[in-house]
């Protein structure tokens, strides 16, 4: 097992879908009912994935100055077409089943963090000694309350001089 690593949260920001143009017919508020197949998985923990991107000449200042703003802009443009992903899973008392709801102003949580973990240990495909808990710091926390839960949250973790991950 690798040495325990530390994660330093650099920034937590909220990315909103890019506003529609005035001539667009897309509504500001949307809801999406869950299907029978969605309801089967509702009580299970959410899917958590981590994608690693190795960059041989990784430059941390360049990442913060150039690449990160492009990621945020791209995410905002993408959310414009998938509004419920910026919304919440809600289950109102008057409804028999929950639904995905987006209300104008809803945002997606994006956490930017820096890690001193061994990047190559985490991405090794031949190392079966990696424990799942070593990946937990790379996964963002979803906002959950009694009556709603965020549909999605993202975390970009920077590994200086190696690359980054998106969880």
Image: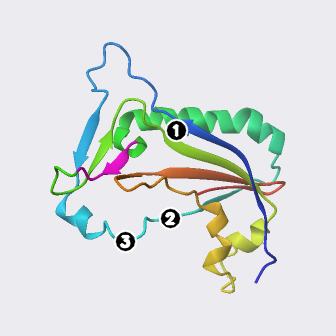
Quadrant assignment, res 65:
top right
Quadrant holding the N terminus = bottom right
Estimate the x, y position of residue 123 in percent, counting from the top left. 68, 70
Estimate the x, y position of residue 68 in percent, counting from the top left. 67, 38
Estimate the x, y position of residue 70 in percent, counting from the top left. 63, 34
Depth check, mark 2 against mark 1: the one in front is 2
Residue beneath disc 3: 44
**SS category of the residue bearing label 2:** loop
Question: Does residue 21 show up magenta in the picture?
Answer: no
The magenta-colored residue range is 87-92
Which residue ends up furthest to the top in the rendered image?
Answer: 22
Residue beneath disc 1: 75
In the picture, the disc for residue 48 is 2
Please indicate whether residue 123 sits to the left or right of residue 147 in the image: right
Which one is in front, 101 or 147? 147
Depth check, mark 3 against mark 2: the one in front is 3
């Amino acid at each position: 097992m690798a040495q325990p690593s530390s994660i330093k949260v650099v920034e937590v920001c909220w990315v909103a879908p890019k506003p529609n143009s005035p001539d667009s017919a897309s509504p500001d508020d949307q809801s999406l009912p869950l299907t029978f197949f969605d309801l089967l998985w509702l009580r299970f923990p959410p899917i958590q994935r981590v994608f690693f991107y190795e960059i041989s000449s990784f430059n941390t200042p360049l990442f913060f100055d150039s690449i990160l703003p492009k990621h945020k802009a791209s995410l905002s443009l993408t959310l414009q077409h998938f509004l419920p992903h910026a919304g919440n899973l809600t289950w109102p008392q008057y409804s028999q089943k929950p639904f995905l709801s987006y209300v104008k102003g809803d945002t997606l949580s994006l956490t930017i963090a820096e890690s001193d973990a061994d990047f190559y240990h985490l991405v090794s495909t031949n190392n079966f000694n990696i424990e799942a808990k070593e990946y937990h710091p790379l996964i963002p926390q979803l906002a959950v309350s009694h009556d709603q839960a965020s549909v999605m949250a993202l975390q970009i973790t920077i590994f200086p001089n190696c690359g980054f991950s998106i969880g």
